[in-house]
Image (cartoon, helix red, strand yellow):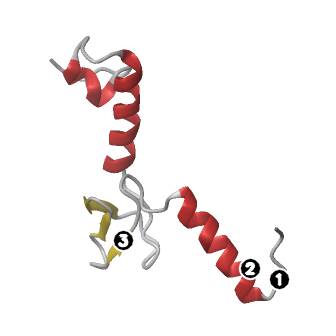
Amino acid sequence: MPKTKKVGSTGRYGARYGSTIRKRVREIEDKSKAVYKCPICQMKTLKRAGLGIWACSKCGEKLAGGAWEPNTSAGRSITRRVTRIAEGLKDDF
């Protein structure tokens, strides 16, 4: 049975498991199978190699990141905070 536009990769489950769970699985699979921009060479060649491991096919760099996307929301907030501290700006608590 081929995938359709609406259900995407979760079409293989048919009517099983409930629509909400299938939607969550589709979002996770779309994130993990997407190609991202490499922070080293700035090319859109970063792909998931394993759980939390991201590899760039152009420069060969391997990075640690999130399970389903290379940059998690927690990682982005920490990066912002470290950047602000490095620039000498006051941290707002």
Which residue does the image show at 45% across and 64% down from the upper left? 37
Image height check: is 13 above or below 82? Answer: above
**Whole-number angstrom distance, CA of label 3 to CA of label 2:** 23 Å
The numbered mark at residue 84 is 2
Q: Quadrant of residue 28?
A: top left
The residue shown at (21%, 20%) is 13
Image check: 40 left or right of 75? Answer: left
The residue shown at (29%, 69%) is 55
> Would you call the spot at circle 1 few (<14 residues within 10 Å), some (14-19), or many (20 or more)?
few
Disc 1 + disc 2, Cβ < 8 Å: yes
**Residue 64's disc number:** 3
> Residue shown at 44%/79% (left/top)?
40
Which residue is under mark 1? Answer: 89
Rounded to the nearest whole Å, what is the CA distance between mark 1 and mark 3? 28 Å
Percent across and percent down for residue 56 are 31, 70
Secondary structure beneath dot 2 equals helix
Which mark is first along the chain, 2 or 1? Answer: 2
Disc 3 residue type (three-letter)? Ala
The image quadrant of residue 57 is bottom left
Three-letter code, disc 1: Leu
**Other-residue count near label 3 (Cα within 10 Å), few / some / many at <14 / 14–19 / ≥20:** some
